[in-house]
């Protein structure tokens, strides 16, 4: 009677049972792969590296005419000299002594050029055409004069910004200046006028009160004007004109300190002369390095230097020299001088141009250009300089393709900086005039974050800085911008591979709505679809709440079904094409096609969703879902695409667990069994094991048990017990257990040596796998229900089984306490609750029916 009760209990109980939700230990997580309801893993979508470094990749959705160019012409003329002038409110009166040197420039931002004696042809070095054009040299002069005077010459300089008016002045003083002109005109036709003491004090005062008083003057005091070309100073307005006054009057400091005066004359000016005269690239690079160091040591970077205009003009002209190492040095100094407007845009373009060449990565690493570009991102106004920031960010994106520079970015706080910039962009609404242009910038930013996401430190910073929220906000705003969407999705694709980030994303409730919206909008954009599906697969693999929340979103299952149909049709068409081309030598590719890859990851989502009890039950009743899964088994062989077929079988297995009304799996169970038979007979062991697992659940139905007997599948199950693989034995034993529920099918275990193989499995795997040991004991218990004699029931394996069960029920012998604590506790729990009760009953049954032979005593 007791045996009957136990038999009925086993009969009512399916082979695989749904685990009770509870906090799992590490050992339980490891063991969870054994259960019928299993999540699936898959490879992350592959993103090939761009063959060219550009602002937008070859797959960009932006038409070339609607996006900023990656290739452009950049020359000295691209820079704006007017923007470089410092502004000052200082307004001064002329000095009492007479001017010796007066310089006029057509361009208000041109620098001062001083007289220089004519040079012989032998003294003028040969330079390239770019170099000649750069400085506009002639045989008589140069951009920066090398001639220097002495402070005691008591010179004054008048610098006008209106050449036409000053030409009149030139003619009025023609007699005084006739014998003293020795200068070289600038290419821009600027004029230089040398005055001496023939201009009397009274004449000068009259002159200053007259027409010339409306011009900009630059008066020099005791300092030597010829040593200091290009001095910048204040620009007070007088009757509509600008007047610039620079210098020292006695001991009074006017616009610059004596220290800066000395610094300029002693350290900076010689380097500028070297930059003007030198035509060796290596020497020019060295001079730029010295210039940066000198400015940095004196804290003269930025806008503090009064004469930065002269310095910048020299640097701008060096851009025409065709040398990336030199342009890198130049760009670094220009950026450090805090230019803005057109010049900021041009220098950011210059940096981008340098970064486009992968061969420049090494020199970029050594020259700290990254620091300057990050400073631009940190300080410049987003709306005012959005185009400059685009190329600045583009340069940083290109740098992020280099492992050394990528690591440097993380250490310099680039992650937090980029997220702050993203937050600013997210605050710009769609109706704003800057919204569209900032989309170009956002592409560069998100592409950089995608590269940064490869580094563990960057991932931690992204998590701690609230990246999930900002990325979702950007995704929501830019849903129509496929480029932005794909980069953000790529970031999520990388980060969702990690448990902590996956949990943070799962907690962001709006992400599910966003992902569904994107799937519906870009259904045929495989590169976007596959990554979103991959992310959803990661979320639903690790979080039961995510499974429920995604399933409850309106239209979630319909969206998955629609995607399934779309890519199934694409895969069918591709397969037909390969079959037609087989005669021409075309074979199915080894790796999954794009359509197959989407289906693999899509089925994974369904398998993971089915882990949740209510979601799994609903999906089991969704006939269209089950039909599509079965269709995969119908038209696709495991040799065509192993992962796709096995994933489909696993998902069917998960759904077959749920015994619900109108279950689609139950309705199609015989057809499913037919399809599984094809997989079972394949040479793919993973496919075989998966098919056996499905049979383990389906064999709860009498129709499937009859199918297994009719097709001789049980013999295959018994043969699998020799596989010496725990998982294979476990799955095969599950099918045999369900067969033994029917008393008419129990005798089948004696065929093919089934009893002996079960005992061997118990001996081989029992102490290490109490779950499998329990399953074997249950099978033997069902089999021996009507036992009359242990020997007739178990044959020659009886004694072995008795000794084995006795040993396994001895706690000290059976349990290995040298295991780690979690695993040891788990093993003990399963041994006590699952294995021990069944094994004790089985041992008692065998012992009670095991009759020892009579012993005959022979008399002496």
Image (tube, grey):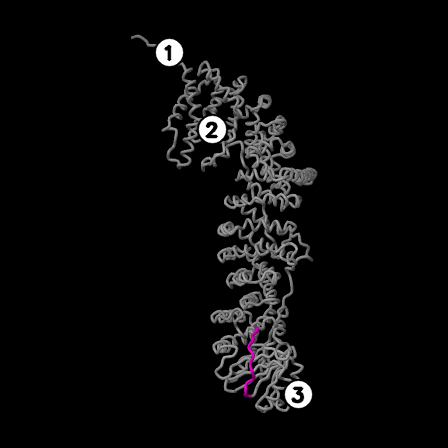
Query: What secondary structure prevails in the magenta region?
Result: loop
The image shows residue 846 at horizontal and vertical percentages of 43, 18
Q: Which residue is mark 3?
A: 171
Residue 407 sits above or below residue 541 on the image:
below
Residue 679 visible in image? yes
The secondary element bearing badge 3 is classed as helix
**Residue 158 rendering spot, x and y as whole percentages:** 59, 83
Gap in angstroms between the C-alphas marked 1 and 3: 147 Å
Spatial distance from mark 1 to mark 2, Cα to Cα?
A: 37 Å
Q: Nearer the viewer, residue 108 or 855?
A: 108
Q: Which residue is mark 2?
A: 772
Q: Mark 1 falls on what kind of element?
A: loop
Given residues 371 and 321, the one toward you in this image is: 371
- Residue 582 seen anywhere in this rendered image of the structure: no
Please tell me which of labels 1 and 3 falls first in the chain: 3
Outermost residue, front side = 239
Q: Residue furthest right?
A: 580
Q: Which residue is mark 1?
A: 854
Compared to 359, does 521 lie above or below? above
At x 63%, y 68%, the residue is: 78
């Amino acid at each position: 009677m007791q045996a009957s009760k136990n038999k009925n209990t086993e009969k009512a109980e399916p082979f695989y049972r749904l685990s009770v939700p509870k906090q799992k230990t590490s050992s339980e997580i490891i063991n969870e792969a054994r259960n019928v309801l299993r999540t699936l893993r898959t490879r992350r979508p592959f993103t090939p590296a761009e063959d060219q470094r550009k602002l937008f990749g070859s797959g960009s959705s932006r038409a070339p005419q609607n996006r900023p160019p990656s290739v452009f012409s950049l020359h000295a003329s691209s820079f704006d000299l007017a923007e470089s002038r410092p502004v000052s409110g200082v307004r001064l009166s002329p000095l009492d002594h007479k001017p010796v040197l007066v310089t006029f420039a057509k361009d208000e931002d041109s620098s001062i050029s001083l007289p220089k004696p004519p040079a012989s042809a032998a003294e003028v070095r040969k330079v390239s055409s770019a170099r000649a054009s750069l400085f506009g040299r002639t045989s008589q002069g140069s951009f920066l004069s090398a001639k220097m005077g002495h402070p005691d010459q008591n010179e004054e300089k008048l610098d006008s910004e209106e050449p036409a008016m000053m030409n009149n002045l030139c003619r009025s003083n023609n007699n005084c200046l006739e014998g003293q002109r020795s200068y070289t005109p600038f290419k821009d036709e600027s004029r230089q006028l040398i005055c001496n003491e023939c201009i009397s004090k009274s004449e000068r005062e009259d002159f200053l009160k007259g027409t010339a008083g409306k011009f900009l003057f630059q008066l020099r005091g005791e300092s030597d004007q010829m040593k200091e070309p290009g001095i910048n100073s204040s620009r007070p307005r007088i009757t509509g004109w600008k007047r610039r006054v620079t210098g020292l009057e006695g001991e009074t400091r006017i616009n610059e300190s004596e220290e800066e005066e000395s610094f300029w004359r002693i350290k900076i000016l010689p380097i500028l002369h070297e930059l003007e005269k030198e035509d060796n690239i290596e020497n020019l690079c060295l001079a730029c390095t010295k210039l940066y160091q000198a400015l940095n040591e004196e804290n003269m970077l930025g806008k503090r230097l009064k004469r930065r205009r002269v310095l910048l003009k020299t640097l701008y002209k060096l851009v025409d020299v065709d040398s990336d190492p030199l342009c890198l040095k130049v760009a670094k100094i220009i950026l450090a001088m805090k230019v803005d407007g057109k010049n900021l845009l041009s220098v950011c373009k210059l940096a981008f141009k340098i970064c486009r060449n992968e061969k420049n990565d090494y020199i970029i690493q050594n020259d700290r250009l990254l620091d300057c570009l990050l400073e631009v991102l940190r300080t410049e106004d987003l709306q005012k300089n959005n185009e400059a920031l685009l190329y600045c960010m583009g340069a940083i994106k290109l740098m992020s393709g280099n492992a050394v520079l990528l690591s440097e970015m993380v250490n310099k706080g680039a992650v937090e900086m980029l997220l702050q910039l993203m937050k600013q962009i997210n605050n710009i609404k769609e109706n704003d005039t800057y919204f569209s242009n900032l989309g170009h910038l956002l592409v560069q930013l998100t592409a950089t974050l995608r590269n940064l996401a490869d580094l563990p430190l960057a991932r931690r910073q992204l998590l701690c800085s609230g990246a999930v929220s900002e990325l979702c906000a950007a995704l929501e705003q830019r849903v129509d911008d496929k480029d932005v969407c794909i980069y953000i999705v790529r970031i999520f694709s990388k980060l969702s591979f990690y448990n902590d980030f996956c949990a943070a994303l799962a907690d962001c409730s709006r992400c599910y709505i966003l992902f569904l919206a994107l799937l519906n909008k870009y259904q045929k954009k495989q590169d976007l679809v596959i990554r979103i599906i991959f992310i959803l697969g990661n979320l639903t693999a690790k979080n039961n709440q995510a499974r429920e929340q995604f399933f409850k979103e309106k239209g979630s299952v319909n969206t998955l079904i629609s995607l399934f149909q779309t890519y199934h049709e694409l895969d069918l068409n591709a397969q037909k094409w390969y079959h037609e081309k087989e005669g021409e030598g075309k074979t199915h590719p080894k790796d999954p096609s794009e359509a197959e890859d989407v289906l693999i990851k899509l089925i994974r989502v369904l398998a993971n969703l089915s882990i949740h009890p209510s979601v799994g039950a609903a999906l089991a009743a969704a006939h269209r879902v089950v039909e599509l899964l079965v269709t995969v088994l119908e038209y696709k062989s495991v040799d065509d695409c192993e992962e796709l077929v096995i994933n489909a079988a696993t998902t069917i297995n998960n759904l077959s667990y749920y015994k619900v009304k109108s279950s689609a799996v139950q309705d199609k169970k015989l057809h499913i069994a037919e399809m599984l038979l094809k997989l079972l007979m394949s040479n793919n062991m993973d496919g075989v094991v998966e098919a056996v697992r499905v049979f383990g659940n389906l064999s709860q139905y009498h129709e499937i048990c009859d199918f297994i007997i009719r097709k001789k599948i049980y013999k295959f199950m018994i043969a699998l017990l020799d596989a010496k693989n725990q998982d294979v034995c476990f799955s095969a034993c599950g099918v045999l257990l369900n067969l033994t529920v029917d008393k008419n099918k129990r005798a089948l275990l004696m065929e093919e040596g089934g009893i002996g193989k079960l005992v061997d499995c118990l001996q081989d795997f029992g102490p290490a796998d109490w779950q499998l040991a329990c399953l074997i004991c249950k099978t033997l218990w069902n089999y021996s229900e009507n036992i009359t004699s242990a020997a007739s029931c178990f044959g020659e394996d009886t004694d072995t089984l008795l000794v084995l069960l006795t040993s396994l029920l001895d706690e000290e012998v059976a349990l290995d306490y040298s295991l780690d604590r979690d695993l040891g506790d788990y093993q003990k729990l399963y041994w006590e609750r699952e294995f021990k009760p069944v094994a004790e009953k089985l041992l008692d049954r065998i012992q009670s029916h095991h009759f020892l032979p009579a012993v005959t005593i022979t008399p002496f």
